[in-house]
Amino acid sequence: MFAITGRMRRRLEARLWLTAGNSLRSGHPNAEPALRCTGAARYPVRVNGFRPLTRVVPREPRPLLGWGFSFYTSLLEGGRMTLRDTLEALKNEALEAVAACGDIKDLQALRVKYLGKKGPITEVLRGMGKLPKEERPIIGQLANDVRAAIQAAIEEKQKALEEREIQEKLASETIDVTLPGRTQPKGNRHPLTAVIEEIEDLFIGLGFSVAEGPEVEKDYYNFEALNIPKDHPARDMQDSFYITEDILLRTHTSPVQARTMEAHQGKGPVKIICPGKVYRRDTDDATHSHQFMQIEGLYVDRNVRLSDLKGILTIFAKKMFGEDRKIRLRPSFFPFTEPSVEMDISCFHCGGDGCRVCKQTGWIEILGAGMVHPNVLAMSGFDPEVYTGFAFGMGPERIAMLKYGIDDIRHFYTNDQRFLQQFKRA
Amino acid sequence: MNISYKWLNEYVDLTGVTPEELAEKITKAGIEVDQVFRPGEGIKGIVVGYVASCRPHPNADHLNLCQVDLGDETVQIVCGASNVAAGQKVVVAKVGAVLPGGVKIKRAKLRGEVSEGMICSLQELGVDPRFVPKEVADGIYILDEDAVVGDDALPYLNLDDAVLGLDILPNSAHCMNMIGAAYEVAAILDRDVRLPEPRVEESDRPASEKVSVAVEAPDGAPFYGARIIEGVKVAPSPKWLQNKLIAAGVRPINNIVDVTNYVLMEYGQPLHAFDYDQFGSDRVVVRRAREGETITTLDGVERTLSPEDLVITNGERPVAIAGVMGGADSEVTETTTTILLEAALFDARSVRRTSARLGLRTEASQRYEKGIDPNRVLLAADRAAALIADLAGGTVRKGVVRAGAYRAEPKIIEMPWTKINAVLGTALSQNDVLAVFRRLRFDARIEGETLVVAVPSRRPDVSIPEDLIEEVGRLYGYDHVPATLPDRASQGMLTAYQKKRRAVMRYMEGSGFYQAVNYSLTTEKKARSISYVEEAGHTPVRLAMPMSEDRSVLRLGLLPELLETVRYHLNRRINDIALYEIGKVFLTEEAALTDLPKERERLAGALTGRLRPTDWHHDARPVDFYAAKGVLEGLFDQLGLTERIEYRAASERTGMHPGRTADILLDGKVIGFVGQVHPTLQKTLDLTETVVFEVDVEALLKADVPPVRYQALPRYPAIARDIALVVDEAVTAGQLAAVIRASGGPLLKDIRLFDVYQGEHLPAGKKSLAFSLTYLDPERTLTDEEVAAVHERILAELKEKLGAVLRG
Ligand SMILES: [Zn+2]
């Protein structure tokens, strides 16, 4: 049998909902999803059945405490003072019982006993008809006061017991928060991808788009369109993997520039960066790789100046290597640019004082650049009298090696997980 | 190119500029100085000594006791060199001296005789043995007689010099000689250039009596000149000449050869001295070689020539490979008395081709390849003839016997002078611009708006207006160029494809995979070890000249190299591996390429071991087919392609387990596969059980997907019903799901398989699969009866089509 009256049942239901709701919100392990309103869509049938009630524990009916209701009636009949004393005694007794009570269930019993419909106070009030008319309000008031006092004591006790119950529950639920959590396994991108994406994003912010092209190229796009005709001494500088006389693995990403310019049919602006794999006949060692990455940039438009190149590269150097970086351009030679320059940045390791990283010079060579050679413009359909442009190229491996202090280029292509996972934050 | 600071100082006054400062300035002006080498660095206590007497050591066979006068004292030195003799001036390292490498000279006793110092060889003084003259290669170095006893010996050896190593690029070939370097340094320092003015004293007898010159291949040799010097005496060169050559990295041979090398270094004009008497005729004929013709070059190697090669002949056979190397037969020797001196212009391309084909790069060929100054060809001939006459005592016959002609007029370049500022972004004045050309010694003027520059023939690298802009930029200094930003604004962004590709990469990484980047070059065997494409027609693209067989063909798929990476880890006892790669493969059906191969971007993954290690929450399970498939399902879901993807058992893929591999189809077309590596391949590669996938990223990312559109949230609750079905083993989950989907009608919103069971409590040959079905009507709350009706219909269909019954 359930020792629960109709009203209590409703109140309990309400509390259970509430508790369940709270416990759900707090992630309580006993939380029953079926009790959650939002869970209704998933488990509608269960919600309608008020299954929570099954959680209220049935218990044995308790015998009524020592005295019967007739006892009060007899007291009542004993006279006014007796009645007043009786109420006082009743109050004292009830308060003592409440104070001594250490269990919520017992407290419920006390509530029923003293404040229930069949309890002594009701009994007293019921017997008030026998009192003189003028006594009635006084006793009535007294009975109400006693009832209120007992009620208050029970409420207070209830709170205290509930609080204790919660504390005990919390204490029993304490876990070792230092045990590791449940994690999802997570990999990360290759450090070269990290560098390339960083550079891409930086130049996208400066108005460049990302252009891509084939890794197996025609000799024309890889060399000739870039002002490197057959027999040009510059071909010495990059020995290539040929497939046929006219087809080879691209030795730089510049052919993408030639192709993009050609596709623009002589109309600027062309503003692109070209990342990708390139191939050269090098024996793999700590500083050489027959396959590596390159990022080249190209900006062709009316009135493009070398000073614009300097401005763009200054931003690049600062964003990539730190706001304190300075750059310097040194004259150099590339067949596809004229004038040609090489860019050094002030050493990010020593700040320019000289150290191992910068070989005591205070400067680190980062990239090659220059103003697009008029032959290159013309061959790709741009009028060199109208258009000028700048181009630059750099090696993500070198940048990654400098940035992260990597000492051997072969690490990038060995793909050791212990190497790769060092770049989670990169 | 090695530039001796002391030698350079003969042409440009370098007062006040240290070698290091000079190196810095040259580098900033565009020619990188690799290093400044001070040959005498670290050497201390070296003086000129006079060997007053020399007698054999009483107790040793090969040692001598020398009394050596050092000016302030005479000491006894035990010397083992065979060429030591009384009366020589030698280089002595005194007691307390320091030699290269930190060697300290101490007082010593050798077989009972005191030795107070050491008489030095050039090698002991740090000279590269390759450049030590033969006559002193095996002994001590002997100074000229005019050396002053007691003096510091370093200046006599030029060891107080500094050598600047210039990194010559194709546009700085004009600095591959002392005079060119002098012009460059003079421009940088804004100082004068002092040039040698060769004066040849000629006899009255014309050279043309002794020799004739004919050029049969004028495209290869536009000009050929010959001088005759008679009555020479071949001997070692004087010390000043030897020292300069050593500093330049050339080994002194004899006075004739040394002079040609000296003038080569000075003017950049290659010369060749033939022994006239060994030439074999009095006719110089320059022509293309005949197929199969041979010549033994100075280095003693017999070389077979081809008709592309240009040769100097005596009318019959080749005596030199033009611009590359002379022949051994007509080499100048100690007995030579008459010299045929060649000074010619050879075509850069021709020399380059021959030198490349023969693998023979010489000081001469390097200069011809990069282009020489035609203006200097006769100057150099005169300079050499005068020096030979001076040093070897010969008589120069009158005139240069010649064939062909050359142009050496300055090249005129005109351009609007304002273009310089427009391209550089500078604000230079006309005077600033003209000042640069004055320093370069180019004649320049500005007429109206036009800059007119006459570029001398010594600078063939300057030929267009942009070259002039570069000259201004580099000498004015790029440090003075401001940093600006382009005037025109523009927008940049990734393409949709690039954005999605990044999202795919992030997805893979979020799913536990590390990104690998492998080589595109692999072996043919590996390329074919796992088949990606259905068509067997694809051949891997092969390099014409691979560096090794390991990297000889382009990959057809990403997996073979990715599996190598897996093996790499297993070899290092790393057993839990999750790697992915995104990259291109190269497809062609042509055996010999005539067009570019098709390049496709692929995504591949390899998993082995456990995706998540065992922890206190759960036991780790080794990865299996479904781990890999699940990753892909999540990816397809993210791309909005789930509904259009299909998996089909694939039992015949090379390299893949026939029972554990599925083709992946997008809109009915195969775009990849997922499965377990075939046990045989697994064993060959020494792998653990590995699951892999490879898909065509382009097909995935270029598939048309509708744009994202918000759909109203359902206002009514969904109802879930679970069913457990018992079916024959052969029935697949895919078949069951298809029947459920087809018979579920519009109310069935979702099917989820949550359990597969086989074994106890089930009849043999049967299995049980449990699905959770979700029903929803967006317009109203479904009643139990409505759901039950659909549910019954599904069950009936399942029973009829697949014999499925509800599990009791
Ligand atoms: Zn530094």
Image (cartoon, coloured by chain):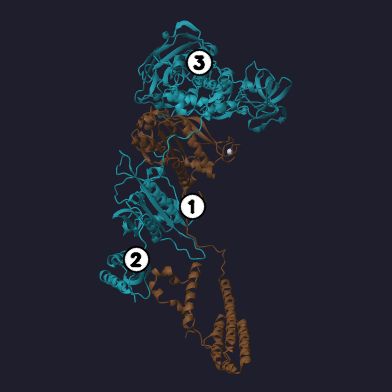
Q: Is residue A366 left or right of residue B67?
A: left
Quarter of image, ligand 1: top right
| Viewer-nearest residue: A221 or A246 | A221
Amino acid found under the numbered disc labelled 1: Gln
The reply to whether callout 1 and callout 3 are in contact (CB within 8 Å) is no
Extreme-left residue of the structure:
B800
Name the spot of residue B276 as percent of width and height, x first.
Answer: 45, 14
Vertical side of A25 occupied by B644: above or below? above
Mark 2 — residue?
B751
**Which image quadrant is residue B758 in?**
bottom left
**Distance between mark 1 and mark 2 Cα atoms:** 38 Å
Amino acid found under the numbered disc labelled 2: Ile
Mark 3 — residue?
B335
| Viewer-nearest residue: B169 or B333 | B169
Mark 2 or mark 3, which is nearer the start of the sequence?
3
| Viewer-nearest residue: B82 or B18 | B18
Mark 1 — residue?
A417
Q: Which chain is brown?
A: A
Q: Residues within 10 Å of mark 1 (few under 14, many from 20)?
A: many
Name the spot of residue B38 as percent of width and height, x first.
Answer: 60, 27
Q: Nearer the viewer, mark 3 or mark 2?
A: 2
Residue B457: in sight, yes or no? yes
Vertical side of B799 occupied by A218: above or below? above
Labels 1 and 2 positioned on one and the same chain: no
Labels 3 and 2 positioned on one and the same chain: yes
Question: Chain B hue?
Answer: cyan
Amino acid found under the numbered disc labelled 3: Thr
Q: Nearer the viewer, mark 1 or mark 2?
A: 2
Q: Residues within 10 Å of mark 3 (few under 14, many from 20)?
A: few
Is label 3 in a helix, a strand or a loop?
loop
